[in-house]
């Protein structure tokens, strides 16, 4: 039986590369609670992003939660096309999520729609750099400045992305990252925040990871257990030396898909956008066709039968989910709904062979003929 081509496969160091670090950790018996590897990784990322601080977390979701907890309570404007984590973090911190639509080219927040959602209760705009594509940074900065709002980013996908020759994570008052195993740069599970301005209470965020404890050990503010262990930080330090290779590999795969799939009828390939890291490769199946949802499902099924794993990432749009529809105010967000109903992310990671890429190309091509004739 042919092996399934997965949508994502994590990079892993070799045992030989890992041994010296593992030995050092085991010998030190300092496994967690801000050990030397955690601090070294945080320092390196801080330099890379020019951040004021770069606290690390046990996962990206808790980093988002900490960022949200650091805001005064109120409304947070968020695009409806994102992962559930973004909205959960807003709610768990006691804010009200206020949805807005996305730009149909970048799949990121539509700034003019976000502007319409600003009220006297709005505290922040939380943009999402979807698939590593930069949001409309300048317009967001202008809007936030004009209304005295905090500008935050869910940059779960954006490690390695750039905007105007600066790392994308260095924009906004704070930008959260996910270092989950499927990401371009990872620590198996993990996350972090590039804290970029004094508008963010970095001491609160630091403490949040450790039960809100002061240096004397008293709980003085909200907190959780979100510390990154030494073993996870070790993975990060080893991966930092080679994530450029991952970026280059994904960029080549992305070019392959663009060159090979661009002539297929009823398949829309999103435009290349400067600065994106090619962490995902989304395609839109029967975009804007009322049958898109059905056709996309058929294509996913066809691909699975051809041993190609692909994902409808993100679906449903957040304002249409059971958990969050109560925040939708019965509004519709046409771009978010249309993208969400037609998008498929294709396999993309270093290690995909030419033969595998060719079989994905064939499966998508043949699958499109089958579903379009149904
Ligand atoms: C947009 C977005 N936000 C937040 C998260 C949560 O990150 P983590 O899985 O590291 O908790 C993810 C995970 O992929 C994501 O895609």
Image (cartoon, grey):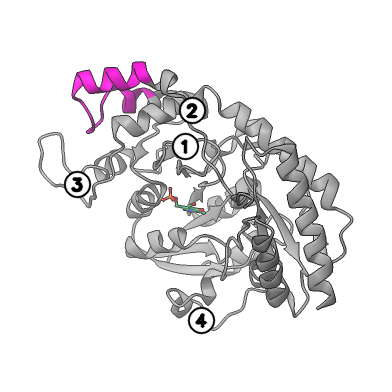
Q: Nearer the viewer, mark 3 or mark 2?
A: 2
Q: Main secondary structure of the magenta part?
A: helix
Q: Earlier in the sequence, mark 4 or mark 2?
A: 2
Instruction: Report the residue marked by disc 3.
Output: 211
Q: Which mark is residue 186?
A: 1
Which is nearer the eye, 356 or 49? 356
- Pick out the residue farthest to the bottom: 330
Instruction: Report the residue marked by disc 4.
Output: 329
Q: Position of residue 290 (x, y in %)?
A: 75, 80
Q: Earlier in the sequence, mark 1 or mark 4?
A: 1
Quadrant hosting residue 161? top right
**2 and 1 marks in contact (CB < 8 Å):** yes
Instruction: Report the residue marked by disc 2.
Output: 239
Inspect the magenta stretch and tell me whether residue 153 lies in it: no
Q: Earlier in the sequence, mark 3 or mark 4?
A: 3
* Local SS, label 3: loop
C-alpha gap between disc 3 and disc 4: 35 Å
* Local SS, label 1: loop
Q: Nearer the viewer, mark 1 or mark 4?
A: 1
Side of 241 relative to 166 (left or right):
left
Q: Which residues are magenta?
A: 19-40
């Amino acid at each position: 039986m042919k092996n399934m081509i997965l949508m994502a496969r994590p990079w892993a160091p070799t045992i030989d590369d890992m041994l010296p670090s593992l030995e050092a950790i085991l010998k030190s018996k300092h496994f967690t609670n801000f050990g030397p590897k955690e601090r070294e990784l945080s320092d390196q990322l801080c330099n890379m992003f020019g951040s004021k601080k770069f606290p690390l977390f046990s996962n990206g979701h808790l980093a988002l939660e900490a960022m949200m907890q650091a805001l005064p309570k109120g409304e947070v404007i968020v695009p409806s096309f994102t992962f559930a984590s973004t909205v959960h973090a807003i709610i768990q911190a006691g804010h009200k999520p206020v949805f807005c639509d996305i730009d149909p080219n970048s799949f990121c927040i539509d700034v003019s729609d976000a502007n319409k959602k600003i009220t006297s209760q709005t505290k922040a705009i939380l943009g999402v750099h979807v698939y590593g594509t930069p949001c409309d940074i300048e317009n967001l900065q202008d809007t936030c400045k004009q209304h005295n709002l905090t500008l935050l980013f869910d940059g779960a996908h954006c490690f390695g992305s750039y905007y105007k020759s600066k790392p994308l994570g260095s924009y906004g008052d704070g930008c959260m990252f996910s270092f989950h195993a499927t990401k371009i740069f990872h620590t198996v599970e993990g996350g972090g925040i590039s804290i970029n301005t004094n508008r963010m209470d970095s001491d609160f965020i630091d403490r949040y990871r450790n039960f809100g404890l002061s240096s004397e050990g008293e709980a003085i503010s909200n907190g959780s257990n979100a510390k990154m262990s030494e073993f996870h930080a070790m993975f990060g330090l080893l991966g930092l030396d080679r994530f450029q290779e991952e970026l280059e590999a994904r960029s080549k795969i992305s070019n392959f898909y663009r060159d090979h799939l661009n002539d297929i009828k009823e398949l829309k390939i999103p435009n290349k956008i400067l600065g994106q890291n090619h962490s995902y490769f989304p395609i839109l199946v029967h975009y804007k066709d009322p049958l898109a949802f059905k056709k996309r499902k058929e294509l996913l099924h066809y691909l699975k039968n051809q041993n190609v794993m692909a994902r409808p990432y993100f679906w449903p749009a957040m304002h249409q989910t059971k958990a969050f529809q109560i925040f939708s105010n019965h509004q519709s967000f046409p771009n978010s709904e249309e993208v969400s109903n037609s998008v498929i992310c294709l396999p993309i990671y270093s290690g995909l062979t030419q033969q595998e890429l060719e079989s994905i190309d064939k499966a998508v091509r043949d699958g499109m003929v089958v579903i379009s004739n149904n």
